[in-house]
């Protein structure tokens, strides 16, 4: 594993037993094995697509424990540890590191959003980075955090020796470009936009953490590999196939959409945890149609 986080990483879903609602280790492990076999550069557990806000502390720990043996040493295992208090964020970072996480993903505290001034955020992220046993990846996701990390703040934080980069899920290429001013040999910018992966790479991002890669892993990883080889034609064609999947299944339908897509391509999504609701039948048909158009639905066995 290199010092830089790069390539395509999958923010894995948390699989739940349909009867009890508890985490299902067997299905989770099967998904992680499949993601790694499809060429991803690592996985993120307890992220937004992993329903992090709906997990308890022990469940977060279990996800890291279950994933660790399945992620090769040259790939990244990242754990989401963001919390409303600096104290809890630090405890989660320690827990994740003890269980083998290579880095932690930290969303900004946002319940007291009006109090999250630049001074407050710098103080929070610096203390987390000072005390985290593993590198910290900043997480900009305005649609959930209800705030945007200012590029100047990110540039200031990028000089910290234990802050290794940022995931930007805003979908705003201008903002991504502003974050790239902070990129260095030690600080990496990743996009969270599957529909904007090609454009992000063109701007200089080193990869992405993409919900779409969970059910279109070979396609997303193939886009990155083609870009790295200088084959912009193949990368562009892969991006065209990814755009509707990322825009509708991930962007519009969210976690329930991603879980339905996983089921339809032969992996395990299952039910989201309440209060999230599963897709309605019409939405599920829409997901099936999009996957078919992208050539991602498993082929039916030939008649005997």
Image (cartoon, rainbow, N blue to C red):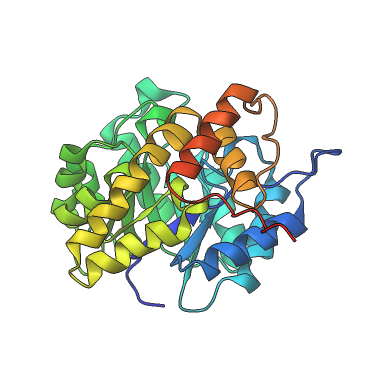
Residue 173, percent from left and from top: 19, 40
Residue 252, percent from left and from top: 44, 28
Q: Nearer the viewer, residue 202 or 288?
A: 288
Residue 78, percent from left and from top: 50, 59
Asked if residue 95 lies left or right of residue 118, the reply is right
The number of callouts visible is 0
Residue 171, percent from left and from top: 29, 37
Q: Is residue 235 above or below residue 120?
A: below
Query: Which quarter of the figure has residue 298?
Result: bottom right
Residue 201 showing in the rendered view:
yes
Asked if residue 176 lies left or right of residue 139, the reply is left
Q: Residue at x 45, y 53 (%)?
A: 213
Q: Split into 4 quadrants, where in the image is the C terminus?
A: bottom right
Q: Is residue 206 above or below residue 191?
A: below
Q: Split into 4 quadrants, where in the image is the N terminus?
A: bottom left
Q: Residue at x 15, y 46 (%)?
A: 177
Q: Residue at x 67, y 24 (%)?
A: 275
Residue 132 showing in the rendered view:
no
Q: Nearer the viewer, residue 196 or 92?
A: 196
Q: Is residue 299 above or below residue 33?
A: above
Q: Residue at x 31, y 63 (%)?
A: 224
Q: Nearer the viewer, residue 122 or 141?
A: 141
Q: Residue furthest right?
A: 19
């Amino acid at each position: 594993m290199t010092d830089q986080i790069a390539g395509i990483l999958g923010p894995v879903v948390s699989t739940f037993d349909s009867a009890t609602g508890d985490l299902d280790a067997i299905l989770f492990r099967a998904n992680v094995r499949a993601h790694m076999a499809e060429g991803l550069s690592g996985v993120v557990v307890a992220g937004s697509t992993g329903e992090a806000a709906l997990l308890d502390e022990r469940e977060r720990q279990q996800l890291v424990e279950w994933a660790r043996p399945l992620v090769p040493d040259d790939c990244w295992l990242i754990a989401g540890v963001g919390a409303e208090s600096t104290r809890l964020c630090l405890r989660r970072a320690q827990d994740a590191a003890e269980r083998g996480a290579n880095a932690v993903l930290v969303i900004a505290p946002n319940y007291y959003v009006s109090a999250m001034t630049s001074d407050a955020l710098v103080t929070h992220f610096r203390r987390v980075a000072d005390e985290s046993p593993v590198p910290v990846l900043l997480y900009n996701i305005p649609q959930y955090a209800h705030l945007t990390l200012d590029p100047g703040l990110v540039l200031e934080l990028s000089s910290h020796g234990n802050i290794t980069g940022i995931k930007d899920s805003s979908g705003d290429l201008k903002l991504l470009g502003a974050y790239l001013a902070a990129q260095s040999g030690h600080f990496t910018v990743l996009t969270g936009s599957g529909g904007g992966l090609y454009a992000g790479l063109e701007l200089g991002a080193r990869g992405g953490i993409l919900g779409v890669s969970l059910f279109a892993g070979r396609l997303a990883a193939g886009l990155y590999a083609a870009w790295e080889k200088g084959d912009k034609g193949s990368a562009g064609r892969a991006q065209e196939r990814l755009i509707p999947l990322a825009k509708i299944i991930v962007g519009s339908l969210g976690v329930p959409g991603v879980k339905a897509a996983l089921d339809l391509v032969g992996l395990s999504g299952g039910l989201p945890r309440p209060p999230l609701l599963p897709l309605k039948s019409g939405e599920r048909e829409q997901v099936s149609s999009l996957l078919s158009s992208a050539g991602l639905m498993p082929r039916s066995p030939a008649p005997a």
